[in-house]
């Protein structure tokens, strides 16, 4: 099972109190946390009503996109999801996929900024527990998953009808392989030269002429 997750307005939804708690847990001192909170809380907003601005009000969430500090703060928030999900997996709430000659490596999730993919055994409990964990994460952090843009993919001989039934049950889309993740096609035979054509084209386009 591959479950691709889409976070709704990821940067705009991060709660500042949750971010401050995460920095505390990661060992950031009060001075550093005060600087970060000072930068965030210095922003205010107002609403135009019939062309006239209302009284300014204080924000309580959101990271400014384009600010060079925002990606690092967002990674701290996502790292908390990684730790929570790893604990849930160790306690048996989620079963990943074991690979390697002796099944010594277990893959359960891949994170890159706000791109998240969960990989595990195909069963209903696995899928429901992912949704529950993400719901708890939303209540704490403010990051809500957009189920209408999420997709589930059945691999390893899972029937299409079964995938469609589970997708309908949780309200997400049905994906298929190969699919694109971080600009690279996943799920095709990467031993074939043709499978790397898209990657090579993207790299070539960025090279200096």
Image: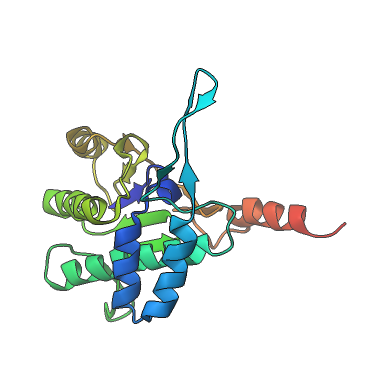
Residue 6 falls in image quadrant: top left
Give the mark count.
0
Q: Which residue is painted at 21% across and 32% down in the image?
A: 168
Q: Which residue is painted at 34% across and 82% down in the image?
A: 27
Question: Colour mode?
Answer: rainbow
Q: Where residue 46 sits: x, y (%)?
A: 47, 36
**Residue sitting at the far right:** 209
Q: Which residue is painted at 43% across and 47% down in the image?
A: 12
**Residue sitting at the far front:** 55
Residue 159, above or below 63: above
Res 108 seen here: no
Residue 191 falls in image quadrant: bottom right
Q: Nearer the viewer, residue 129 or 164?
A: 129
Report the side of 78 relative to 167 (left or right).
Answer: right
Q: Nearer the viewer, residue 32 or 102?
A: 32
Report the side of 163 relative to 8 (left or right).
Answer: left
Q: Give the quadrant of the C terminus.
A: bottom right
Res 193 seen here: yes
Residue 146, above or below 75: above
Report the side of 30 relative to 102 (left or right).
Answer: right
**Residue sitting at the far top:** 50
Q: Where residue 11 sits: x, y (%)?
A: 44, 51
Residue 146 falls in image quadrant: top left
Report the side of 189 relative to 58 (left or right).
Answer: right
Q: Which residue is painted at 32% across and 45% down in the image?
A: 153
Q: Where residue 52 sits: x, y (%)?
A: 52, 24
Q: Where residue 136 sits: x, y (%)?
A: 19, 54
């Amino acid at each position: 099972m591959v479950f691709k997750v889409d976070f709704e307005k990821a940067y705009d939804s991060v709660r500042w109190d949750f971010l401050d708690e995460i920095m505390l847990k990661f060992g950031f001192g009060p001075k550093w946390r005060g600087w970060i909170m000072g930068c965030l809380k210095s922003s205010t907003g107002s609403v135009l009503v019939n062309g006239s601005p209302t009284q300014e009000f204080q924000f309580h969430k959101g990271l400014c996109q384009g600010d060079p500090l925002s990606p690092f703060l967002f990674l701290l928030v996502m790292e908390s999801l990684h730790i929570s999900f790893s604990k849930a997996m160790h306690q048996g709430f989620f079963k990943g996929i074991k690979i390697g000659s002796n099944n010594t490596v277990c893959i359960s999730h891949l994170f890159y900024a706000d791109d998240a993919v969960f990989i595990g055994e195909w069963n209903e409990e696995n899928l429901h527990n992912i949704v529950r964990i993400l719901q708890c994460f939303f209540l704490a952090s403010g990051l809500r998953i957009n189920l209408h843009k999420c997709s589930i993919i059945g691999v390893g001989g899972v029937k299409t009808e079964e995938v469609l039934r589970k997708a309908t049950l949780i309200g997400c889309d049905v994906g298929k392989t190969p699919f694109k993740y971080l600009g690279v096609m996943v799920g095709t035979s990467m031993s074939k030269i043709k499978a790397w054509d898209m990657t090579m084209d993207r790299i070539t386009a960025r090279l200096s002429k």
